């Protein structure tokens, strides 16, 4: 069993990982030897703080060991992806991949005899959203019926929030000047609309009137942020999205939770001061990446 997208997981699986993650947060001394002798490979094409650290530390806390592989220092770039993944899967027990393309994540999962976890691709970021669901549940005491407004660019995080919402009954409203750009999963959006668990709006203030949680992410995914070839598109987006920045003025007097998967681009999608606002659960979100990663590993170990 793999974790390529939450579309492939059942509601029961998601709830189990959320509950296990919360139990591990309360009692991190549990399961210290459950994965003794097992190895987690982390094969990354892109940079990372949270996903890499949560993976490396998480497997160690469960008794196993990590093997971090920067794609460029391996022979993955020279050879067929499936061949190299098959070899890696002979050495290790779990693999986290952070690849540019979702098609490569899927190919890796197909080729691997051990569980593959998607540590963020162009399309989805399921491990982030499992930690987010845990954080929302710990903060609000429920997932079903929660109204989450995602503000900004519809991207990998947004797709995974919609996928999760469909499974747990959380309504995701996307407040954006560009509804459903190429990065959006059109099939998922259609299913979400049909279920009444997904909508888009350009009226940010109206969306805020009816939400429990507000969530934002970068307007430009990490691989493009410093890419000179993306400079014109970056400028276009900064202008287009600036009215959708989360800041004190916008959120004044509103009773809601503030979320961001991080890394934050202070002064762009979020006013940096909001990270420390009493309504912010952003640092709990980041902390839960570790507990949730451990919960995913335990779930995959028990079900593969
Ligand atoms: N949120 C998240 O995935 O962070 P990293 O890119 O630092 O792993
Ligand atoms: N949408 C962001 C998520 C970072 C964790 C990106 O892909 O860069």
Image (tube, rainbow, N blue to C red):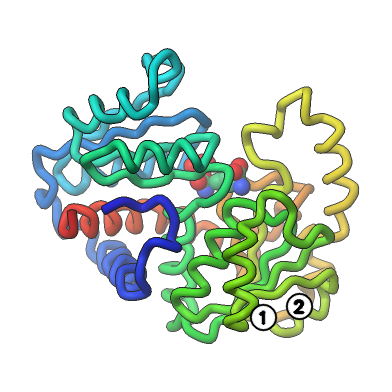
Residue picked out by circle 1 = 211
Q: Is residue 178 left or right of residue 41?
A: right
Whether residue 148 appears in this view of the structure is no
Residue 177, percent across and down?
84, 60
Whether residue 168 appears in this view of the structure is yes
Give the answer, above or below, for where 226 lies relative to 111. above
Which residue is painted at 28% across and 59% down in the image? 295
Which residue is painted at 30% across and 29% down in the image? 85
Residue 249, percent across and down?
84, 68
Query: Residue 288 is drawn in which quadrant?
Result: bottom left
Residue picked out by circle 2 = 207
Q: Is residue 238 left or right of residue 218?
A: right
Give the answer, above or below, for where 181 lies relative to 47. below
Give the answer, above or below, for where 97 lies relative to 240. above
Q: Is residue 162 left or right of residue 40?
A: right
Mark 1 C-beta closer than 8 Å to ligand 2: no
Query: Mark 2: few, some, or many residues within 10 Å (few <14, many ≥20)?
Result: many
Residue 246, percent across and down?
76, 61
Of residue 23 and residue 182, the one placed in the foreground of this image is 182
Q: CA distance from mark 1 to mark 2?
A: 7 Å
Mark 2 C-beta closer than 8 Å to ligand 2: no
Residue 68, percent across and down?
33, 28
Of residue 111 and residue 152, the one placed in the foreground of this image is 111
Query: Residue 66 is drawn in which quadrant?
Result: top left
Which residue is painted at 72% across and 26% down in the image? 227
Give the answer, above or below, for where 167 lies relative to 283. below
- Contact, CB < 8 Å: mark 1 with mark 2? yes
Of residue 265 and residue 14, the one placed in the foreground of this image is 14
Query: Mark 1: few, some, or many residues within 10 Å (few <14, many ≥20)?
Result: many
> Which of the numbered marks, if any, corresponds to residue 198?
none
Which residue is painted at 53% across and 78% down in the image? 170
Considering the numbered disc 1 on the image, is that residue within a helix, a strand or a loop?
loop
């Amino acid at each position: 069993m793999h974790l390529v997208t939450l579309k492939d997981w059942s509601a029961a699986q998601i709830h189990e990982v959320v509950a296990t993650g919360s139990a591990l947060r309360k009692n991190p001394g549990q399961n210290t030897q459950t994965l003794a002798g097992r190895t987690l490979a982390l094969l990354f094409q892109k940079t990372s703080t949270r996903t890499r650290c949560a993976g490396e530390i998480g497997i160690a806390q469960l008794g196993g060991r990590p093997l971090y592989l920067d794609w460029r220092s391996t022979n993955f770039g020279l050879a067929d992806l499936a061949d190299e993944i098959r070899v890696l899967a002979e050495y290790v027990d779990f693999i986290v991949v952070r690849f540019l393309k979702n098609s490569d994540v899927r190919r890796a999962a197909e080729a691997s005899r051990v569980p593959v976890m998607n540590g963020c691709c162009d399309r989805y970021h399921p491990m982030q959203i499992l930690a987010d669901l845990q954080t929302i549940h710990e903060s609000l005491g429920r997932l079903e019926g929660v109204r989450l407004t995602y503000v900004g660019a519809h991207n990998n995080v947004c797709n995974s929030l919609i996928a999760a919402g469909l499974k747990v009954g959380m309504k995701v409203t996307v407040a954006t000047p560009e509804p459903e750009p190429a990065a959006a999963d059109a099939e998922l959006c259609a299913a979400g609309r049909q279920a009444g668990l997904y909508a888009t709006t350009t009226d940010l203030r109206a969306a805020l009137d009816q939400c429990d949680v507000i969530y934002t992410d970068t307007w430009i995914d990490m691989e493009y942020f410093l890419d000179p070839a993306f400079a014109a598109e970056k400028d276009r987006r900064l202008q287009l999205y600036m009215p959708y920045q989360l800041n004190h003025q916008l959120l004044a007097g509103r009773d809601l939770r503030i979320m961001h998967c991080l890394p934050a681009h202070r002064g762009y999608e979020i006013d940096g001061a909001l990270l420390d606002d009493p309504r912010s659960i952003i640092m709990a979100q980041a902390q839960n990446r570790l507990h949730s990663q451990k919960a995913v590993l335990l779930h995959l170990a028990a079900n593969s």
